[in-house]
Image (cartoon, rainbow, N blue to C red):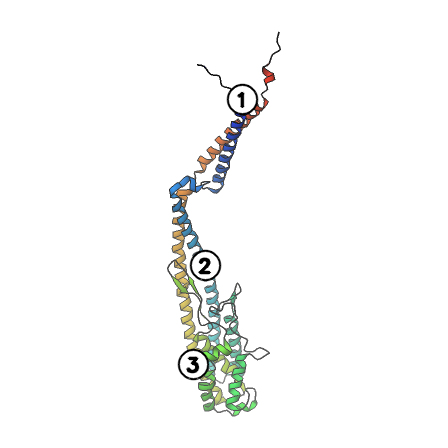
């Protein structure tokens, strides 16, 4: 039996519109792939292999985050090294002046001025900051570690020095009568009461707001390193002690023998502090090299992961360009067909009866 089927222009138009929608969606995906270089839908394209690229991207993000942190750490350590070198250079100038004072008749005013300049440089450098974080405050990086010893309003450190001196000798360091202090009495004061001002407890109470705990950072997947030093390091304490005894104990008014006692003690402290500064610089230098080496390793890992991800997710630009051209042609044809269907009219096929 022969059956008759009917085809309407409406059903043809609906199918054409659906075809246009599919072509448009494919064209959008192809254009996205051309701009990103990746499959428009990685999950659909790779199927079960999608988990591999997800895992590799997580690894890539993780090590890139470590590298970004390492770059910040390197910048902080470079700034710290610069500050330490400035401190060391100024300490060297002061040490030369002290050594010269032991063999020549150096002017006391010159020694005192060098001590004051050295103290100011030391405190300025220990108060160095980067991006709002103080470099030598340890984990208390939002707190300025040192107060100005020579500020108009006497700092706690200046008051402690003046108080200890007054308690020992019954006069302030500014009193011209300090010329009567003997070398032996001054030596005893420097070795005991004055030295105690720089003990752990007194240093924390009167001199430094820094933490003893240095900043630590994860510099690789498996390695954590201390990446800073703090103002509480022994080298800084000894240097501060030397500067303070020359600039804060009425040095210029002392008699010659007592001045020599102060100079000899300060010389010993600065020499020890200089050695300590070298150790601190060396420690940071070693850590800097570790971080730099780690970044080099991370660069290699990033390159490997990027290539591996690209092998799975990347598309061939030439193929995609050809696909876009083909889809565009198909879309234009579909639009043309739709336009023709819309213009069809039964009246075009009806002829008047004779």
Q: Which residue is mark 2?
A: 69
Q: Position of residue 146 (x, y in %)?
A: 52, 74
Task: Please tell me how crowded label 1 is: few (under 14), some (14-19), or many (20+) other residues with Cα within 10 Å.
Answer: few
| Contact (Cβ within 8 Å) of mark 2 with mark 1 | no
Q: Where is residue 354? Give x, y as percent.
A: 62, 7
**Quadrant of the image occupied by residue 279:** bottom left
Q: Quadrant of residue 176?
A: bottom right
Vertical placement of residue 40 versus 7, above or below:
below
The residue located at (52%, 92%) in the rendering is 180
Front position in the image: 331 or 147: 331
Label 3 CA crowd tier, 10 Å (few <14, some 14–19, many 20+): some
Q: Which residue position is annotated with label 3?
A: 268
The residue where tag 1 is placed is: 8
Out of 3 and 200, give the one closest to the viewer.
3
SS for dot 1: loop
Q: Is residue 288 above or below residue 118?
A: above
Count of numbered badges drawn on the protein:
3
Q: Residues within 10 Å of mark 2 (few under 14, many from 20)?
A: some
């Amino acid at each position: 039996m022969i059956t008759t089927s009917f085809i309407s222009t409406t059903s043809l138009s609906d199918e054409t519109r659906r075809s246009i929608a599919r072509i448009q969606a494919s064209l959008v995906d192809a254009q996205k792939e051309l701009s990103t270089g990746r499959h428009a839908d990685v999950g659909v394209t790779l199927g079960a292999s999608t988990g591999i690229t997800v895992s590799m991207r997580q690894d890539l993000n993780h090590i890139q985050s470590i590298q970004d942190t390492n770059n910040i750490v390197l910048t902080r350590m470079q700034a710290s090294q610069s500050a330490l070198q400035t401190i060391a250079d100024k300490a060297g100038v002061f040490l030369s002046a002290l050594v010269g004072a032991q063999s020549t008749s150096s002017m006391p005013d010159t020694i005192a001025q060098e001590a004051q300049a050295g103290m100011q440089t030391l405190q300025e450098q220990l108060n160095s900051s980067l991006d709002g974080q103080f470099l030598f405050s340890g984990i208390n990086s939002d707190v300025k570690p040192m107060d100005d010893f020579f500020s108009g309003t006497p700092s706690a450190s200046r008051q402690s020095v003046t108080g200890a001196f007054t308690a020992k000798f019954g006069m302030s360091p500014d009193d011209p009568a300090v010329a009567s202090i003997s070398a032996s009495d001054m030596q005893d004061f420097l070795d005991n009461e004055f030295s105690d001002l720089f003990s752990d407890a007194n240093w924390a109470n009167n001199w430094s707001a820094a933490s003893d705990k240095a900043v630590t950072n994860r510099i690789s997947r498996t390695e954590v390193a201390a990446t800073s030093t703090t103002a509480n390091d022994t080298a800084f304490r000894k240097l501060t002690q030397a500067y303070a005894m020359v600039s804060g104990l009425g040095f210029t008014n002392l008699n010659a023998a007592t001045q020599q006692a102060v100079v000899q003690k300060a010389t010993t402290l600065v020499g020890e502090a200089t050695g300590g500064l070298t150790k601190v610089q060396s420690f940071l230098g070693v850590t800097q090299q570790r971080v730099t080496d780690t970044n080099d390793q991370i660069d290699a890992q990033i390159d490997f992961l990027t290539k591996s991800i690209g092998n799975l997710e990347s598309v061939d630009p030439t193929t995609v360009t050809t696909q876009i051209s083909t889809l565009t042609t198909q879309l234009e044809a579909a639009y043309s067909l739709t336009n023709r269907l819309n213009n069809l009219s039964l009246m075009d096929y009806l002829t008047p009866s004779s």
